[in-house]
Image: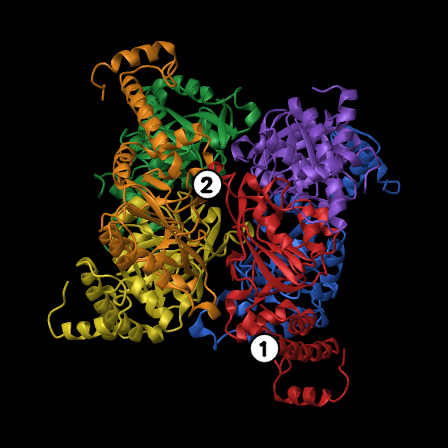
Chain colours: A blue, B yellow, C orange, D green, E red, F purple
């Protein structure tokens, strides 16, 4: 799905850029529908970078309770590899959990890069102690089966309003989570790095008291100064 | 998925019972999670009975637009057989359509028993003229792809809060839609018919001015009279 | 709670005025918080006038299922008198019913003036055939106990955002439902009748092509003409 | 804002096409954000075509009640010309009205083509009797000032999720309302007429039992037959 | 309602278990409808254990403002005993407060175990400084009477979707709040303690790198090892 | 719009009072509709006091993208003066940003007192590091234009349910934000200071174990003691 070494460099670049910058580049690349909405980070300052491994929940139905269930979730977790992000489609339902502390701990032990669920967490405080980046829509002590059950894994899902396919790259920070389609991730990362370099220059000027006009976005005069500055070490 | 002759009798029975009665029987059979919520009938007085053929929408994503789309929906519609109900999972999104007049017309021509979508209809007035039972969450003139695309068919879906598998029986009237799991449909239908017979007796008594106490639900005295009445033609 | 003869005249007056006019008078009487919101009439053109008899639902809880339930609702219905309006607090929950056809039929037989529920109806089509004014928040075939149970009757309730006490007067038409506190009902009705007489005059002038300016609300010139007109038969 | 004669032809064309067709053409013209959402037609089968005249409501504030209010609305209504559509931004608030029967009657007398409000109607049943196309988000008997007041007119507004400028063309039918930017209206109308002609041909074939495959959308074979058919009178 | 000494032991046990574990045991005891939803803890790491004392708010109505109000709330607070939890039904309304700093301070002085409101807090920052466990649906500076008033106390209420009776046991942590019916509390607590002991063993194995398969839930092999381990001190 | 020196004293007073106290005084001054709802503070313990400078967003429309946009926002930010609060009407839309780190930094450099948006923040973590009081409805990495654009500035707006005019005074703390109309701000501030002095006395008594009855609100006995206490230094 992605070569280890290749991913290593891509992920390092993505760890250095904000989701807001990536979202701006997604819009410039005409990929507007790749910003997830309504998710909360479990801890401030966490940074998520990895590739999607997906899990689809469906509503609980009494007559199907025996056939499907947490086994699907456990099998997926046991198959996680380093850098994988567990992405759960829970249809925004937050009055029952989707994942709890033991499963999250096992995911971390398998090297998972993080968890994204548009449903609820159980044992949120314990999970927070694991240091694993987690994004979610709510917390609730109830077992998943009160409302829904894991149904299938490694299929395309809808999470927080975005179609996520296994292998898509996910990046999260305090603003939320964005998706980079596997094929476009490297190009978007490169453009985002360039944008951030520019914005560091801009922010430094603003911190010195400069006006936004002509500076943000950069007009020709500031761009010339910026280009000149690049031959020297960055201002911030 | 279901034998024609067997279905014929089952469907005839189901056409004779209200969804409220079926929902009561579902609860007695411990199948509470089989009542769909939030759907509107396209026309008053319509009656839907058939077996689910499912279609799963996922959010639109610019980079995947070429690979998937309305072709999935068209192929499913072309495969519909008499008695099939097209069931669409649209995640409750109603600011873009899921199905329009030409597709609905073709579904009717193929003998479809009806359409259930938890998304929006386009061309609602034209579809209403087809006489096909349709249940939906809203109307909207926008093309599906403004928000989402048909992604796969004949898989388990979540529609209006209920897990629907291909082959499950769906029954709809002005109150909404209920699902009967394929395996339990015949037993529930039989119990519902018996309940409706009883309730016709009860309603006739209430119309004559009798009190609900001891009558609804029936106590021993009224039950005896009811049993006796069954040897004569029904009161209503 | 209210004298029969007194009510008869009051109710006759209220049947002649629109809820929009009553709501305007409620605002003038500084009773803004008496307009219910989010209710749908079961049939167009119906007119509800009567006094509240209240029923409070609470969420279903498995361990209390035996102790409370539909018996509370049946007893209340059996105690309804002509002119009573059954008012149900269902906390806006619409994925289970609150009242079905047999109970509604019995309410009509007892002389009830109508039903107002901020929950769901079951057997909506059958109830519509009874000719009883009904206002509701949704339809759903599921039995009440899937979500909640009748808990107590003839207590203050919150229905559609408004505190309703037994004996309060309720008036409904296609716009929705308003409450008149028992003590203020007669005064508001009188003012509303006067307002409607004025507005019939205004509407007749508008239909003749007059401008709203100076006419709606009436300035001194139009008021003089209006006062003069009252000595002749009304224009509409 | 638009020449009378020019508008006459444009409006005639638009009266002949469905909003679903216009929405499809808007998407093809890369104008996706012009389909209003969540509006209900006051009467089935009505057709709205006209140019926007806008009214912006803002939340009620006690200390500003004297300065602004219904006078803004009345003045706008008195300035309506034939073909104008009154478009109200009410921020989706439906627990107080925005327009009632007398104002709507005057709008009709001034020749207004219709009313679009993302707030509530008062006197909905009376307004329905006027035969004026009206789209709205709810009904409520309460006076506007319970929640908000007309603040200014003929400015850009947000209605039902869409930016509407005075002079934009609005078209509504049972599916809802779409906006055609003034500059693009004629081109979109022409393309929509062509699409509808094609779809009438397609629908006729579907009604004769043809498969959707190769027909909808038309492949080369069906297109050839369609082009040939255009020399003869249409099939429907 | 509960003996002091008996409660002391029960509460000590409940302080040692997570709400997620209690919710699992509630489900096993077929008490699914006892998990409150949508509440936020005022401070991370707090633990709530106590018995419900209930307060029911109803919507504000101008003509009833003099008769009822904050006096009901003050009297209830003055009657709180050590271990009592103040539970407020506010119908999910969060644009006005339900309780502020002085009332909360008095509740703490009376020995209250905590506060649970499905409405809003006022003076949230000051209340947080009291060290009292509080669960709520929002914060808002507005006085309660802007929207609603305390109406009666020590009655059954609906809070955060759950029927709460005076004397029911409430337990809260970072995941939210669960209710244990008075009659079942001791049995559920005992089962929860046993489950937590097991899960500590499981978590320790997962932390050592064991797979979830056969371990969570425990299969026969791991169960044997677990039973053996119980003769030695726990692994965590 | 407000004299510097005059503002200095007013702002100092307002920094000393809680929003809950101001909201109580607003209600006493019959200004109920001035409490904003649904906003979250970016950092706990922050205090916002300043005068509104307003910005109105409208939905994005492809054909108008060139004409309007971020330039309106930048110009407004460049015109901010010390004590100004940037107030953004974003119609509650939180799946795209309204303001990011560079604009917020420039606002701080211009001396802005804070930012209030009923839309989303981008770069929330960076903005939090600026120490500028910010209130918002959500975070989202997407650029504003994914959903809406700045359209005009220094006009009346609707923010978080309240009409805000340029020059109105805004005060925020952990409970949320209240508005003081420019004309009434000084009187309300004075009354709030008096109320807080009283409440400090009350809180001190409650902390000493006194009952709320007769104390909160103060009856004649406690009032006499309070008046006496004012000749000595305050109890807290």
Residue B171 vs residue A156, the one in the foreground: B171
Residue E123 vs residue D232, the one in the foreground: E123
Residue plotted at (77% across, 40% down): A198
Q: Chain of mark 1?
A: E
Q: Which residue has dot 1 on it?
A: E187
Q: Position of residue B6 (x, y in %)?
A: 25, 75
Residue E104 in sight here:
yes
Seen in the picture, residue B201 relative to F153 is either above or below; the reply is below
Asked where in the image residue A6 lies, by quadrant, the reply is: bottom right
Asked where in the image residue B225 lies, by quadrant, the reply is: bottom left
Circle 1 sits in a helix, a strand or a loop, which is it? helix
Answer left or right for C188 relative to E158: left
Q: Chain of mark 2?
A: D
Q: Position of residue F55 (x, y in %)?
A: 63, 30
Both on one chain, marks 1 and 2?
A: no
Seen in the picture, residue D213 relative to F5 is either above or below; the reply is below
Label 1 or label 2, whichever lies nearer to me, is 1
Q: Position of residue E195 (x, y in %)?
A: 64, 78
Circle 2 sits in a helix, a strand or a loop, which is it? helix
- Residue lying furthest front in this view? F221
Distance between mark 1 and mark 2 Cα atoms: 61 Å
- Residue lying furthest right in this view? A232
**Mark 1 crowd level (few <14, some 14–19, many ≥20, 10 Å Cα):** few
- Residue lying furthest left in this view? B232
Answer left or right for D212 relative to C129: right
Q: Position of residue C29 (x, y in %)?
A: 43, 29
Quadrant where the N terminus of chain E sits is bottom right
Residue D211 in sight here:
no
Q: Which residue has dot 2 on it?
A: D27
Residue plotted at (76% across, 87% down): E232
């Amino acid at each position: 799905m992605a070569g280890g070494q290749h991913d290593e460099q891509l992920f390092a670049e993505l760890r250095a850029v904000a989701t807001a910058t990536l979202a701006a580049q997604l819009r410039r690349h005409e990929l507007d529908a790749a910003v997830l909405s309504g998710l909360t980070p479990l801890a401030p300052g966490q940074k998520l970078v990895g590739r999607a491994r997906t899990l689809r929940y469906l509503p609980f139905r009494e007559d199907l309770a025996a056939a499907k269930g947490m086994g699907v979730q456990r099998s997926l977790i046991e198959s996680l590899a380093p850098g994988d992000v567990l992405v759960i489609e829970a249809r925004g339902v937050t009055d029952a959990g989707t994942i709890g502390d033991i499963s999250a701990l096992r995911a971390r032990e398998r090297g998972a890069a993080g968890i994204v669920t548009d449903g609820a967490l159980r044992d949120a405080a314990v999970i927070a102690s694991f240091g694993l980046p987690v994004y979610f829509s709510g917390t609730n002590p109830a077992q998943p089966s009160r409302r829904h059950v894991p149904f299938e894994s490694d299929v395309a899902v809808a999470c927080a309003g975005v179609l996520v396919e296994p292998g898509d790259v996910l990046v999260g920070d305090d603003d939320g989570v964005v998706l980079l389609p596997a094929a476009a991730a490297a190009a978007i990362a490169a453009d985002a790095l360039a944008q951030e370099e520019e914005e560091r220059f801009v922010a430094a000027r603003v911190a010195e008291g400069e006006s936004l006009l002509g500076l943000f976005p950069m007009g020709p005069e500031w761009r010339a100064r910026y280009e000149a500055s690049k031959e020297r070490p960055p201002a911030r």
